[in-house]
Structures are given as structure tokens and as C-alpha cells.
Amino acid sequence: MKQIAVVGVGYVGLVTAACFADLGNKVIALDIDEERIARLKRGEMPIYEPGLEELVRRNVHAGRLAFTTSYREALDGTEFAFIAVGTPEGVDGEADLRYVEAAAKSIAETMREPLIVINKSTVPVGTGDWVADIIRQHQPEPVPFSVVSCPEFLREGSAIADFMNPHRVVLGSTDKDAAEKVAQLHLPLRAPIIVTDLRTAEMIKYASNAFLATKISFINEIANICEALGADVEEVAVGMGYDPRIGPLFLKAGLGYGGSCFPKDVKALAHMAEEKGRHPQLLHAVMEINADRRRMVVERVKEMLGGALEGKTVGLLGLAFKPNTDDMRESPAIDIARGLQEAGATVRAYDPIAMDNAKAIMPGVTMCADPYALAEGSDALVVVTDWNEFKQLDLEKVRDLMRQPVMFDGRNIYDPEKMCALGFRYHGVGRGYACPQPEADEAEDAM
Ligand code: UDX
């Protein structure tokens, strides 16, 4: 049984701690937030992640997982210390490293035995070397240590499965023995393990996230062109995805990427490049296309409502940046609500689990008890998050409750033909399909 300390009990830290404990290691997870640790000791999760509560409970019960605010307790007798603290976005788009710095100092001041410090947080290229300098400078007396970079690739909503079945484990270090020991910890995961130098490992994380964000912006650009030319982006993506050089994943057109990683990481990579005098044109285009998706929604809803939003009520179906999470960070819902409000609309919203988090950051948006309460009296609905429960709605009931049956489906969860047949004025994303106009004499009959 190996003993592992995990510093920082946020998303990445908590999943890492619980999963390593489940693999049979003894894990002590530390956070300086006393309230968070007290809640975890009571079995309350600080985040929503499917399966996490049960995983934590099981491993605490088995004596393999414990929580503390004391570095002394966390580091006593441990050979591995993972740093998994937050790296929020700084004022100019650079990563803010103050929590990494604080963790490195505390580790240096507390460690008494040789230690492998493994960085899991997404940090700018070169941070591993900087962490090693901080530890060296703050050790009261020299104790051997090594720094290894081991970037995480977890997705919210499937973080446990992603940890347990990774596509690859990336390890970067100048100390091959230390990298080998960290590789041993990951052997039960049966994944390919890539051992490289510190900076390359850090870069692999940024390059991977930037590439995925580029794929999303690419398909959103194609969606725009499809709309103009009368093609269907959903089928275009399927047709492209069969080519193994392209692949089917991350080609879902929609409202652009949000969340805690892609927006921050693309910006940080561009910032790193510019600091060194490079011009990351592609990254800037990726970010611009992403920002445009949110503006586009406001324009489209305005058009669908006859050119003006003053006095109109618009309902947002979904608030979280993606389904199966209550995370509102960089969610398109925030900008869309603000844009609609600025254009004079009253905005209401419903989300299965993100409404509590959303309330604080979406002033003036009324939260509704369910999708039908949201539909009642709305002039238009916008699908912002592709929650499964929205795919099962009684759409006839929704239509009858609305003041006008206008639906902008930002995630293409409905069939355009069916929506038109139900009497909705419907628009999806990147689909040239338009509801057939009634024949001239039919239209006259209807008058
Ligand atoms: C992402 C990475 O996938 C993960 O490897 C990394 O460690 C952290 O960032 P996450 O932010 O949890 O994970 O979400 P992900 O499922 O990747 O989706 C990111 C965003 O892209 C969401 O806003 C999603 O709606 C959007 N997206 C994703 C699309 O718009 N289209 C797609 O085809 C895929």
C-alpha cells in the first residue's frame, strides 16, 4: 500500500484522491479551506460529480481516504504529493499561480523525508521548474525531492470513468527514477504511459485542450456556412467523422465551448506564445468564433421574434456549460442571458441542477420550477444545455403554454421537421432546414 498526499480538494484533487484510494492506496487529501474539509468529513461533496459521493464514502469507510487541513498530517510518511490546486485565469489571460506557489511553499516547509511532488494542475509551460526552485528556496534544510508533471484530462460528468480508463498517462520529469515511481502508481489503469521532460508534458496538456477547442470552433464555423448554403451540419459532421484522420468526436456544433478548462487554457496558451513574441493567429480565431456563438443566439432570437426583443420574455432551457454538471463556469448561458437582457428581453431559466450556482451570477434572471413553468407565457425558448430530460419533453404541452411557439435549439436536440409539424417556429444550429411556408391559398383559407 503506497501512501499519497493530494493537495487541493477541488474537482481534480477530490477525484484523484478518491480514485487512487479506490486503487488500494492510502490517500490523505488536504485543503486549506477548513469549511470544505469539515463538510467532506461529514460526507458532503463540494461539487456534483456522478458516483463521487459513493466512491468517497466507500474509501473513507475502508480507511484508505482521509481529509485534513494539516500539511504535517498529510505529508508524514508519504512518498508522493500531488498538487491539484486551482489555477484560475489572471487579468491578462495568463494562469494565476498563487495557489500553486502557496502549496509548493507549504510542502517545502513541512517535508522531512524524500518526496516526489507531482503537479496535476494545468500550469504554464515552465511551472514545474519554478515549483522546484520554490521548494529548494523554502526548505529549512535540504531534503531530496523531485518534481513530476502529470496533467489531468478529466471531463466533468465522467471524471471517475476518465480517471480509471485514461487514453494515456503523461509524465514529465528530469528525474527518470521519480517518473518511473509515478508510472508504477498508474500501472493498474493499464493505459499507455508517456514519459517525457517537464516542459513537454505541460505543453501536451495545453496543446490537447487547444486542439479540442479548435475542433469545436471549426465545426461551428462550418455550421454557420451550412446555414447560409442550406446544408445540415449534423450530417456533415457524421460524414466527416468516418475518416479516421478526422474522427467523430468533438464535432458537435452548438453554442461553443465553456467550462473551467477550454476557455482558460486556450487563452493561457495564446498568452504564453505572445509573451515570447509569437502570433498565435489560429488560437485567436478559435476564441473569436466561440464568442460569436453567444452573440449569434441573441441575433437569431431577435429575428425569430420579428426584429425586436423589448417587452419579450425568453426562457433558457438549461444553464450549466454542459449536461450532468452544475458547473456554471464560462457557460454560454451567462452571456446569452446578458445579451438578451441588454436588448430589452425579460429572461427566465430552468436547469435540473445548476440553478443554485447560476442565481448568484445571473442577476435579473428568474428561475423556474420546471420546463413547463418556463414555457408558460414565454415568447421564445432557447435550448442552451443538452440535458437528456429536455429531449423527452411533452412538446405539444410546451407549445400550448407558450405565448408564441418560437424555439431556438442551440444544441440540435430536436428534429426540425417534427418541430415544424408541431407548429413551432423552429431553428436549430447549422441547419438550412426551414419550416415550409403554407401555400398561398391555404394561407388565405387560414385568414
Ligand atoms: C475538458 C476536456 O475534455 C478535458 O480533457 C480537460 O481535462 C478539461 O476540459 P470539460 O471541460 O469537463 O473537459 O468538458 P468537455 O466535455 O470536454 O466539453 C467542453 C465544452 O465543449 C462544453 O462546453 C461542451 O458543450 C463543448 N463541446 C464539446 C461542444 O460544443 N461540442 C463538442 O463536440 C464537444
Image (cartoon, helix red, strand yellow):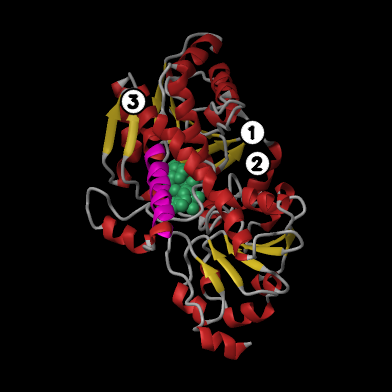
Place of residue 215 in the rendered image (x, y in percent of width and height, measured from the top left): 37, 46
Q: CA distance from mark 2 to mark 3?
A: 34 Å
State the residue lying farthest toward the left: 244
Residue at label 1?
Answer: 69
Whichever of labels 1 and 3 marks the residue nearer the N terminus, that label is 1
Q: Amino acid at mark 1?
A: Thr
Q: CA distance from mark 1 to mark 3?
A: 32 Å
| Magenta span | 210-227
Count residues near mark 1 (Cα–Cα under 10 Å), then give few for <14, some for 14-19, many for 20+: many
Whichever of labels 2 and 3 marks the residue nearer the N terminus, that label is 2
Looking at the rendering, in which quadrant would you find the C terminus? bottom right
- 223 is within the stretch colored magenta: yes
In the displayed structure, 271 sits above or below 47; it is above
Which residue occupies the foreground of this view, 342 or 125? 342
Which image quadrant for residue 186?
Answer: top left
Q: Residue at x 52, y 36 (%)?
A: 264
Residue at label 2?
Answer: 37
